[in-house]
Image (cartoon, rainbow, N blue to C red):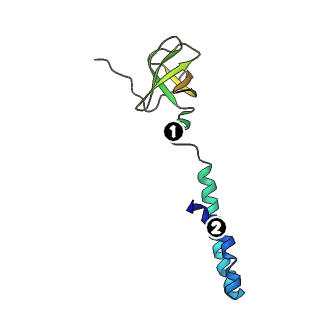
Amino acid sequence: MWCHLMLFMPVGGLALFLVLPWQIALPTYSVISATSLFIYYKIMKAMGQPARVGREALLGATARVVTGGERLGQVRHGNELWGAVSEENLTAGEGVTIVGFQGMKVVVSSAEGAKVQGSRPHRHS
């Protein structure tokens, strides 16, 4: 809530003209306005960046199928194991792309030739 107060800095800065002579108020208000514009620029830049955490960050990522089946299976992305749904058959060891979500499962499609990052093949001992 308090972070929104910074957006009103130029409006609050207008009060300077009521208490200070304009020769002092104008340069001070210019500094306040320039600072506000810089902050607005940084906020807009940060808002335009893609998600780095959460479900939204998984969209478009590649994963490796751990257990396959006709349309259901499990995939590993990094250190996370997700239940998966696909329109194609899932084969263990295959690379897939995460394209959406269905409840708590990821929807995947074949990622032919895609390099799976952050996943290592599971070794059976």
Q: Residue furthest top?
A: 70
Picture coordinates of residue 67, whole percent (x, y) = 43, 17
Is 17 placed above or below 69 here?
Answer: below
Label 2 residue SS: helix
If the image is split into quadrants, where does the C terminus sit? top left
Residue 56 is situated, as x and y percent measured from the top left of the image, at 56, 37
How far apart marks 2 and 1 lie (CA) works out to 31 Å
Q: Extreme front residue here?
A: 1
Task: Determine which residue is flagged by label 1.
Answer: 54
Measuring from the top left, give residue 110's x and y in whole percent: 56, 20
Relative to residue 40, is residue 56 drawn left or right?
left
User: Residue 43: which numbered mark, if any?
Assistant: none
Going by the image, does 107 lie left or right of 122? right
**First in sequence: mark 2 or mark 1?**
2
The residue that label 2 is drawn on is 36
* Front residue of this view, candidates 120 and 65: 65
Local packing at callout 2 (Cα closer than 10 Å; few below 14, some 14-19, many 20+) is some
Residue type highlighted by circle 1: Gly
Which amino acid, by three-letter code, is at mark 2? Ser
Whether residues under marks 2 and 1 lie with C-beta atoms below 8 angstroms apart, the answer is no
Residue displayed at 64% across by 70% down: 9
Quadrant of res 1: bottom right
Q: Is residue 94 or residue 21 the one in the foreground?
A: 21
Say which residue appears at 61% left-offset and 54% top-offset: 45
Residue 90 appears at what percent x and percent y? Answer: 51, 15
Write down the quadrant of residue 102 in the picture: top right
- SS at circle 1: loop
Where 77 falls versus 25 (above or below)? above
Q: Is residue 33 visible?
A: no
